[in-house]
Image: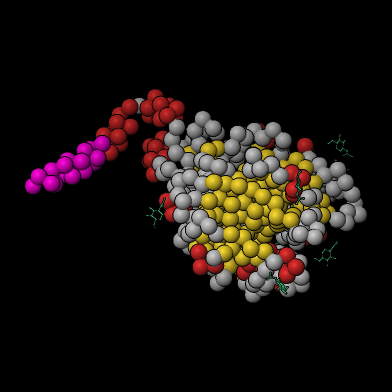
Amino acid sequence: MLGERPRARGVPARCHCLLLLQCLLLLRAPAGLLGDQTRRVSLEVIPEPKDPSQNLLHIRAVGVNSTIHYIWSSLGPPAVLFVATDTPHSVLSINWSSLLSPEPEGSLAVLPAKSVRFSSALIFPRLFEFDSTNSSEVKDGSPGKPYPPYLLANFSWDDVNSTLDPTMLSATFQGRPSKDPLGAFSNGSLAFKVHAFSGSGRAAHLPRLLHTADTSQLEMVLSGAVPQGNHSLFGLEVAIPVLDSECPQLKEQDSIDDEYCPSVFQLAQLLWHSSPEGFLQWRPVAFSQKQPDWKTAVPCQVSRPGPTLATLLPQSRIVIAFFGSSVNFCTFNLTFGDSTGPAYEDQRYLSWSALLGIGIPPVDSFSPLVLGIMVAVLGAPALLLVGGGLSLLILRHRRYSEYEPIS
Ligand SMILES: *[C@@H]1O[C@H](CO)[C@@H](O)[C@H](O)[C@H]1NC(C)=O
Ligand SMILES: *[C@@H]1O[C@H](CO)[C@@H](O)[C@H](O)[C@H]1NC(C)=O
Ligand SMILES: *[C@@H]1O[C@H](CO)[C@@H](O)[C@H](O)[C@H]1NC(C)=O
Ligand SMILES: *[C@@H]1O[C@H](CO)[C@@H](O)[C@H](O)[C@H]1NC(C)=O
Ligand SMILES: *[C@@H]1O[C@H](CO)[C@@H](O)[C@H](O)[C@H]1NC(C)=O
Ligand SMILES: *[C@@H]1O[C@H](CO)[C@@H](O)[C@H](O)[C@H]1NC(C)=O
Ligand SMILES: *[C@@H]1O[C@H](CO)[C@@H](O)[C@H](O)[C@H]1NC(C)=O
Ligand SMILES: *[C@@H]1O[C@H](CO)[C@@H](O)[C@H](O)[C@H]1NC(C)=O
């Protein structure tokens, strides 16, 4: 667990100069993989020819010189493969009879194979539930005493095709345990809502992550399930196949958020060691109500990714199909809520969102409104000082290049 509890509602009390400096450092426009700024993004369900209820969800984002593929599956635990190629013509190839066989190695590929520049996957093996009522067990960052986890490979998932919206570029995997002796999910479900984007922008509802056409968003929603205790906390396990044993790196940074959500806010990122790099990005909050607002936000804690034995994990067919059966895995846990704040059982609702992508992760930049407020709050001198310095630099550079041909 990371030392202190994430700050769920911003950090207003902070030196303004520091804020200004940080914000200036963060001024970076989202840029695409291999320089592609626009993509044609499509979303399709690929059915098994004989049994269309067995299927995969394929998001294809085609740029001038590259393609990004996201392949979602609920064959086994929910999982997503994400692959970038350096051609606009790469295709997904599936051998269904082999994919559904006991040895699915090699049955799923992105072709031509030599165009692949990046590939990785995320698997969601388990949903955890913890009893956070015993204070002697909650200390040291532990969420509490664990109940037996829900194995997501044992869930039965509704047909994703019935939720497909090709115009909105969205689809939902919704499921519940196939055996539910306590009836905890008789009125509830766990959903993974997948959303792709045709351009850059920001979602209409919190946490309003900045997205680009290179990225796709995942929203996990636990809704209506009966908790096993009076103050249950939930957690999600995430596994990543790695070819060596080097886990992606977890970085937490302050990001700014202007009129969309006030003050400096934290952003957590998982970054793959590669070029182009893969990333998973989220704000360290989850929401305990259908209408998310900051009052019902609960903290989301993350553990550092660490190597895990593949034998301890339920296997994902698409991951074996693409990477083979001898890959290593890194796992980490996300935990939602704490023992004192709003609880899942108040509304029986929990949602958490993250952005998955390849290339340069989108970072918040300034809106004109915030620049205006900063001038008012900080006073013009500070801004003028920085702005003046910048324009002097630009001026100098220009002069130099103007004079160069003459001399
Ligand atoms: C696409 O690749 C060609 C040839 O390598 C290059 O000239 C062009 O600038 C690239 N376009 C983009 C948008 O990156
Ligand atoms: C998916 O649903 C659409 C309409 O809802 C239907 O036309 C199509 O045949 C379905 N595809 C599969 C693979 O079930
Ligand atoms: C699909 O895989 C099976 C083995 O599982 C193989 O017999 C068959 O030839 C493959 N089909 C294609 C089109 O490659
Ligand atoms: C709380 O946890 C401690 C340590 O596991 C245990 O000894 C104690 O009995 C628990 N208290 C309650 C009320 O369950
Ligand atoms: C869950 O699935 C595993 C195999 O993936 C099986 O061994 C186990 O019995 C299942 N558990 C339940 C409760 O269905
Ligand atoms: C099931 O859900 C519906 C609507 O979401 C609600 O009205 C009903 O009270 C719930 N039933 C139980 C047993 O929780
Ligand atoms: C929940 O709280 C009630 C009283 O507030 C108590 O009677 C009950 O035993 C508690 N349930 C659990 C599982 O701790
Ligand atoms: C995740 O949480 C579970 C349940 O508390 C624990 O068994 C497992 O070791 C944790 N994994 C990591 C990587 O921290």
Left/right placement of residue 283 relative to residue 103 reads left
Residue 75's x, y, as percent? 75, 60
Magenta-drawn stretch contains 392: yes
Q: In which quadrant will I find the N terminus?
A: bottom right
Residue 251's x, y, as percent? 51, 54
Q: Quadrant of residue 96?
A: bottom right
Q: Quadrant of residue 352?
A: top right
Residue 380's x, y, as percent? 33, 27
Left/right placement of residue 138 relative to residue 110 reads right
Question: Residue extending furthest right?
Answer: 181
Residue at the location (44% across, 54% down)?
34
Q: Is residue 71 visible?
A: yes
Question: Residue extending furthest left?
Answer: 407
Region rendered in magenta? 391-407
Seen from the viewer's position, the closer of residues 52 and 232 is 52
Residue at the location (67% across, 64% down)?
94
Residue at the location (48% across, 45% down)?
38
Seen from the viewer's position, the closer of residues 75 and 16 is 75
Q: Which SS type dominates the magenta stretch?
A: helix
Seen from the viewer's position, the closer of residues 270 and 15 is 270
Residue at the location (57% across, 43% down)?
197
Residue 69's x, y, as percent? 58, 55
Up the image or down, 373 lies above or below 126; here it is: above
Colour pattern of the rendering:
secondary structure
Magenta-drawn stretch contains 90: no
Q: Is residue 278 visible?
A: no
